[in-house]
Amino acid sequence: MILFDHVFKRYPERGEALTNISFEMKVGEMAFLTGHSGAGKSTLLRLIGLLERPTRGQILVNGRDLATLPQAQIPYHRREVGMIFQDHRLLQDRSVFDNVALPLVVAGLPHKEVGRRVRAALDQVGLLKRERAIPVALSGGEQQRVGIARAVVGRPPVLLADEPTGNLDPDLSKEIFQLFERFQYVGVTLLIATHDLALVKSMHYRTFTLGDGRLINDTRGW
Amino acid sequence: MLKPSLRRRRLPKFTDQLAIWLNQHVQSALATLGRLLDTPLPTGMTVAVIGISLALPGALYVLADNLRTLAGGWNQTAAISLFLQYDIDDAAANNLAERLRQLPEIAQVQVITRESALEEFRALGGFEEALEQLKNNPLPVVLAIYPQPNYATPEQLEVMQDKLLKLKEADFARMDTVWLQRFQAILDLIQVGVILLGVLLGIGVLLIIGNTIRLEILNRCIEIEIMELVGATAAFIRRPFLYAGAWYGLLGGLTAWLLVTLALVLLQTPVSRLASLYRSEFELSGLGFTATFIVLMSSISLGLIGSWVAVNRHLRGAEPS
């Protein structure tokens, strides 16, 4: 589902962010991406979501070669990659419902279908009763769950999360990760960047460790 | 549980795509209008600036149009009025008129007899008492001479006037058209002014709308970024801004039309009073259908072009760095 083949990413200002990264993730696989701050975790996720293009090397996502994907096709690629951020990236002046509906509205789904799917997604993250609330009225954990609902509402085969529990206490973090596991059960490929090593160890999934832009460890889960 | 769809999403069928496209356009247009109306004060100010800018050339156009109508009524007046010697009677004058009609440069000659001139003079008002004092008619016979259209330039009329004055029956001649032609020249000048002013203020409107849209884009950059993250196409993101420009243009154009029409309504009464003092049936005409159409179309186009420029400068789409 996700294939990195000798991928390099170099920024003109800060030099090499990723050096010679190669790995493959199968359909329905869940993996963690760890490493110290600035090791290149976010950069790697950004490459998969095509927020940036690699300097060198090949990346295949869902059979698409991201290096040669034309500019006009990028939005369609992003509809197949759900992205979750530490700071949630919610529209603060829109209701929970509108925030979750955004990917569907953008894709031009009919009105009724949007309502049905948004409620299904909110139901999964346990926020069905809060659909009229605006994000500031929600707790940090709830906001993150809105972000997750938005990421999965379009039923993407790939889900990326960048420090999804960075601001949450351990109990809430645990809840979020359990939510991710449920997506994995239905066949979503998940890659989660986190530095919550205790949680990573307790969950026994494949773990990539980045150090200074290199893939220094790739431990299989069991 | 929402199952992911693993198969690559194909582009939908053409008819579905068309339906989606139409639906998104209608939604975007209405949502944009709603957004504009949600903030009535800033929207109103922008619309007012556009409206006033467009009302100025519109009003000048209406002025030129009305003056032209007015001048059109005067084109019927004789080019040269030839006043005959006082002792020439009507019969002699008719003879002379017949002779003049043979000349190639003259289209028509009308004999205004002494009686009819006196009648006309009386009818003009204010002179009755003065005329009562006179024992006999002081007015000479006048020949109103209409030249052939291809002999009607000021220079040619000058030549004709000299020729007419050499007649022994002639006393003096008055040219009626020179000032009319000057007036036409002034009208032409105003028309060029309308175009110049229109172009200048049009550029102004373009800049106003462009800047308004630019600020709107900057205000909503977080929203734009999030929409790009969830897979919005560049067209989807541009669309509301382009619609905003078009709405600004349309509302501004309507405001301009309203301002010009309002001014005309206010002027209608004084103008018809003035016209009645001149015994004229003249009535102010408004922008009319064609001019209204042009004002609205050009204001919408200016809005679209202005927002297009802003959008192209400030939205680059989902460009990966």
Image (tube, coloured by chain):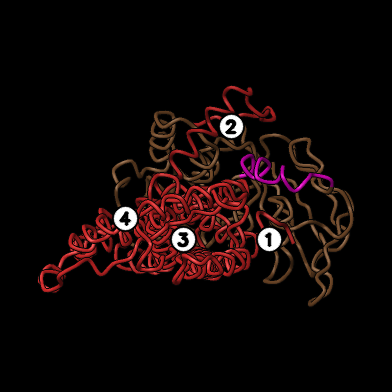
Chain colours: A brown, B red
Disc 2 designates what residue? B4
Q: Mark 4 or mark 3, which is nearer to you?
A: 4
Disc 1 designates what residue? A34
Q: Which chain carries label 2?
A: B
Provide the secondary structure element on which disc 1 rests: strand
Discs 4 and 3 carry the same chain letter = no
Q: Mark 2 or mark 4, which is nearer to you?
A: 4
Pick the residue in front: A80 or B177. B177
Provide the secondary structure element on which disc 3 rests: helix
* Relative horizontal placement of residue B222, taking residue B134 as reference (left or right): right
Pick the residue in front: B101 or B121. B101
- Specify few, some or many for label 3: CA neighbours under 10 Å numbering under 14, 14-19, or 20 or more: some
Q: Mark 3 lies on which chain?
A: A
Disc 3 designates what residue? A170
Q: Magenta residues, as a range? A: A68-81
Residue at 44% across / 55% down in the picture? B75
Q: Mark 3 or mark 1, which is nearer to you?
A: 1
Q: Is A117 one of the magenta-colored residues?
A: no
Residue B281 picture location, percent across and down:
25, 53
Residue B321 picture location, percent across and down:
74, 62
Rounded to the nearest whole Å, what is the CA distance between mark 2 and mark 1? 25 Å
Residue B169: which disc?
none
Provide the secondary structure element on which disc 4 rests: loop
